[in-house]
Image: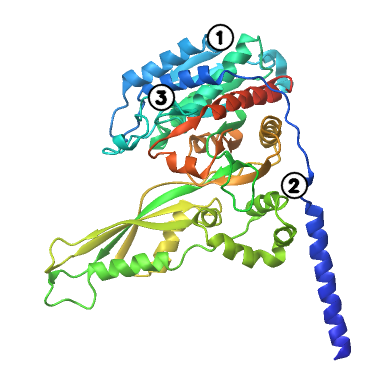
Amino acid sequence: MKKFLIVVAGGLTALVLVMVARTAMMGGGSETAVTRASFAVYDGDAIAARLGAAIRLQTVSKSLEATPDAQAFAGIAQFLSEAYPAAHAVMEREVVGDYSLVYKWPGTDSGADSGANAQKPIGFIAHLDVVPVETGTEDEWTRPPFSGAVYDGSVWGRGALDNKGQVIALMEAAERLAGEGFAPARDIYFLFGHDEELGGGNGAGKIISHLKDRGVSLAWTIDEGSGLAQGIVPGIEKPVALISTAEKGSVTLRFTARGQGGHSSTPAPDTAVSILARAVLAVTDNPYPLKLDGNVVAFLHALAGEMPFSRRLIMANLWLTGPLVKNQLKADALTAASLHTTTAPTIIRGGEKSNILPQQAVAIVNYRIHPRDNVEAVRERAVRLIDDDRVTVEIAGGREPSPQSSASGEGYRAIAATTMAIFGDVVLAPALTLQGTDSRHYADIADDNYRFTPFVYTPDDLQRIHGTDERVKIENLSRAAAWYEALMRRVAGAAP
């Protein structure tokens, strides 16, 4: 027994030493000082005024059935050309799909004479359309939703954060660079879709066809989808720069349960409603398992350096502490969603009258698909879980998750380095975008697709996107313009 206890004690000691060593190797972020590089200062008030003008052009995406407001989209195209003359003098612009805009800034080393030495182009993606303002909520806004008002250090209105603020910041950077005579070494594309809020099929989808017809292949793209989270990641005081390397897909399944009709006074053991209820419970009571895959581990390790030693010890040894960490992440809907495919029943209907047994009942269940799953596999899993021939499961619309982009490739490294240069001491972490963006359309023509907007987002900002009182701080706008300028200099010219 004594020898056994000695062996056990030795094993535990070795285990502790290994865990501590792994934690020590991870280090602490507070010990590393990062100095911001000098960067061009932008006139925030002037940028705010131009964004306000863009917001007043009501480029609203209402529905797939509604025709876009041609006057509004033509208006924003004209506004951009008038507001940014230097950029338009050096960039080639085409209108695609009637309303989307494709800008090409030709690179000096991209001609036929460059041969194998030419670098592939880069694509900056944004969108011109905005979501509608919910009828009846207009009076709840601090400033009218399409006023573009400048108030309290911010620009107010629909699209300020999603996504006209990004469009304007990009154009400000291009205008500054063009005005200074900057000539990119490789082609740069600005790709502004007009229907991202409706899925991007007629905007980004047609832009892709347009680029394919011209034989364009991109090294990487950068779109919206994440940013610098301030006060959002628990336990981390610094801004966390979440650089998304993939985004979830989605599928909507329609469950249709059929039962025997008749009078409610003589019901069968089951009705269409009870059959449907069990089908919905079958999928909601059996959620997809949470998994700490390589991307999640990289994310957690990136955060660990900013945590106290005790928490860093846990993060550094996920091979042992993984179940504990999963349980902690499961408690928050946002973090849990990044670990698995989510299941959400959203609509249920059936029956016409209280004393009539319905012959069928229908439920709509929406899934947001993790990159390790796919649309058809989600449907097949639902069929297996329901296991009832009286229920049909149909795909009512869906899109596959995006491919995973490299967290060590040129694009990721450039985004990370530029963020550190402009924002200083921030935490960098790869992430997964839970919502859909236009980036998913570019997987066929780009080696990598990243999603990152150089805005600092607070919990308050997250409530404003697609909601009441959408606004963007002027500080965010001017710093974002400097960030885009620095990024373009880094990847297509001299580093800042």
Bin the neighbour count of mark 1 within 10 Å (Cα to Cα): few under 14, some 14-19, many 20 and up.
some
Q: Nearer the viewer, residue 66 or 457?
A: 457
- Report the side of 236 relative to 272 (left or right): right
Which residue ends up furthest to the bottom in the rendered image? Answer: 1
Q: Nearer the viewer, residue 343 or 475?
A: 475
Residue 490, image quadrant: top right
Residue 281, image quadrant: bottom left
* Percent x, y of residue 304: 70, 53
Image mark for residue 149: 3
In terms of sequence position, does the residue under pointer 3 or pointer 1 come before the other? 1
* Percent x, y of residue 180: 65, 10
Residue bearing the label numbered 2:
29
Amino acid type of the residue tagged 1 in the rendering: Ala
Amino acid type of the residue tagged 2 in the rendering: Gly
Q: Nearer the viewer, residue 437 or 57?
A: 57
| In the depicted structure, whether residue 7 falls above or below residue 406 | below
